[in-house]
Structures are given as structure tokens and as C-alpha cells.
Image: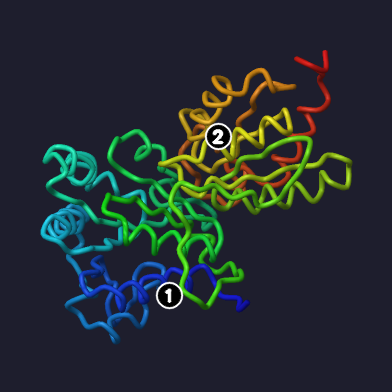
Amino acid sequence: MRTITYREAVREALAEEMRRDSSVFLLGEDIGKKFGGTNKVTVGLCEEFGDERVRNTPISESAIVGAAVGGAMTGLRPVAEIGFIDFVGVCMDQIMNQAAKLRYMTGGQTKMPLVIRTPGGAGRSSAAQHAQSLETLFCHIPGLLVIQPSSPRDVKGLLKAAIRDSNPVVFIEHKMLYNTKGEVPEEEYTVPIGSADVKREGADITVVATQRQVYAALEAADVLGEEGISVEVVDPRTLVPLDTETILASVRKTGRVLLVHESVERCGIGAEIAALVAEQAFDYLDYPVRRLGARNTPVPFSPPLEDFVIPNAERIADTVRSMFQTAVYKDA
């Protein structure tokens, strides 16, 4: 199987869906010929599809999403790019009160086949207004699907599935993953929305991790494996809908669970999954559920301070070790 980057996988998904369906079009700031988007994802697409289907917009997130909502209502399939997830605050009314609710409020007479692509996450020393992980904001809004792929294969398959869906999708890419490489099939495929993926099987503890933290968890699992701790790594891939069965099955097998994400720990997706485990798998636990998210502070500009705030493989490994040093529940 060929190996391509996460960025190339996103671009392939967009191009393939635009060739397959003439109602798919892109809109966003500087996504056309001269620039190709904030992260160069749309380079070359304007040359193939023209500036009617790859539309540069004014610097106005509310206009971008508002136009996309209107396009979706009239039968098109817009894919709107917001250059940084931090800027969704400018267009939250369009996302929260229009895109998320119109299908419900019209009794299903209006569909909303809209994808909002946006990169999130830290790692570039971009400071507090360009390095946030805000996925939980969207998880709280009924009517939205929320997707967070970690690998090139997943990002391509899930983006194609999102474009074909008739519901509004917030599709979050991680800016530090664009250059990562992975195996991606050349043939046509999609990844089902709402299906988690077990990235590594293990017997002693489940680590549920999202996006860049999947790689940190796998790195920690390698280290811990040498110490005799077998780690299972589960990537939800989509947060709404959440594949609860895969997560619960893993926790019931291992008896321990650590939830890792780059958004701040308070009210992060880890809290939702922790509640799920407590409600549906408590009797299987050998140790209390643990969470590991970013520290509850704006993301610093300073690279050392940014590294201190965001979870990494070392912090994951240390947290896992602590969960085997104190015997509680069944081991007590």
C-alpha cells in the first residue's frame, strides 16, 4: 500500500468527492490558486475545478459558514474551511443556531450536508489564540457530528464519509499531523462515521486517546510494554457519534482506563467518556478512571511552557505507572 501524508490524504478526499459529485464545492480564506489554504491543503484544486467550486472568501468566518449553510439548504454540499479552530467563536451563531438546528426545526424537510473543516491543536508555538483544542464545544450541541481523525487513512476515509452525509459535520484536523505519513489505499473507500479503532491491542489497561495523543499513547505503550504493562490504545476517531461499544469492550477486558486528549482536562471529552465508563462498566474496573488533558490554562507562546501544558508520551507513561502502584478496588 502506498504511503502519503495526512495533508495529501485530505486533498485526495476533497478532489475525489468533487469529481464524484458536482454539488460539492469548497469555500474559505485564501484556498484558491495563490495560496491553497492556511495549511496548503487545497493546493492545485482550483486549477482542476475552477474558482466557482474553489471559492476564495472575505476574511469573515461568519460569512463563510453562513454562505455554506445557505448552499447546503439549497441542495449543494459545501465544504467550508476555517483557518484555525480558534476562530469558530466568530461564527458560532451560524454553526450552533443555524447549521445544527435547521434540519430538526424543519421536520427533516431541509437537509444540511455541510462540512466545516478546521485545524486545531498546539505544537507550533502559535500562542493562546492559534493553538486551542475546542472540540468539546461542538460535542455539546445537538445536531452536529464531530470528527477528529489521527491517521492519513482515517482522515481521508472519514472526510469522504462526512461530505456524503446529510448532517452538518465539524471536521477537526490537527495542524501537527499534516506532515505525518501513513498507508492509504489507492482504491475507493470510506471510514464509517461513529466507529472507533483499536490502534494497539493490550491486556492490562485501556488508553483512549484522540488525534496527536494517539501517537503519544502508542509511544508510551512501547515503553510500558518493556516494563511488563500491556497497553491497549483506542482511537475514537469520531466524538459524535461516539463508538461506546468499542470503548466499553476494551475497558471490560483490561479493567483500567486512562483518557487522554489535548483539550483542557476540565469538561473535555475525557470527562464524558469517564461518565460513560462509570455508568456502564464500573463493576469491571480494577482502578478509578483517570483523565489526562492539557493543563487548565491558555496555551503559552513559549515552546517549553507549551510542552509543559500539553500531554506527551512521558506524562502518559507516568500516569499509567501510577495506576499500577496503588492497589484499589479488586486488587485491594
The answer to whether 278 is drawn above or below residue 185 in the figure is above
**Which residue: 76% across, 27% down?**
323
Q: How many other residues sit within 10 Å of disc 2, few (<14), some (14-19) or many (≥20)?
A: some
Q: Which secondary structure, mark 2? A: loop
Circle nearer the N terminus (2, 1) = 1
Discs 2/1, front: 1
Give the residue type that dot 1 points to. Glu
Name the kind of residue labelled 2 in the image: Arg
The quarter of the rendered structure image containing the N terminus is bottom right
Residue at image coords 29%, 35%: 142
Q: Position of residue 100 (x, y in %)?
A: 23, 42
> Gap in Å between the C-alphas at discs 2 and 1?
35 Å
Say left or right for 51 vs 324: left
**Residue at (23% x, 45% y) in the render:** 95
11 shown above or below 74: below
Residue at the disc numbered 1: 12
Q: Residue furthest right?
A: 227
Colour pattern of the rendering: rainbow
Q: Are marks 2 and 1 in contact (CB under 8 Å)?
A: no
Q: Secondary structure at mark 1?
A: helix
**Number of numbered discs overlaid on the protein picture:** 2
The C terminus sits in image quarter: top right
Check the image and name the residue furthest to the bottom: 47
Residue 290 coordinates in the image, percent (x, y): 64, 27
Q: Position of residue 103 (x, y in %)?
A: 18, 44
Looking at the picture, how far across and down is residue 214, in whole percent? 62, 50
Instruction: State the mark number for residue 259.
Output: none
Compared with residue 224, is residue 327 higher up or lower down, i.e. above or below? above
Q: Is residue 182 above or below residue 70?
A: below
Between residue 1 and residue 209, name the one nearer to us: 1
Q: Residue at the spot x=88%, y=47% of the render?
A: 226
Residue 295 is tagged as: 2
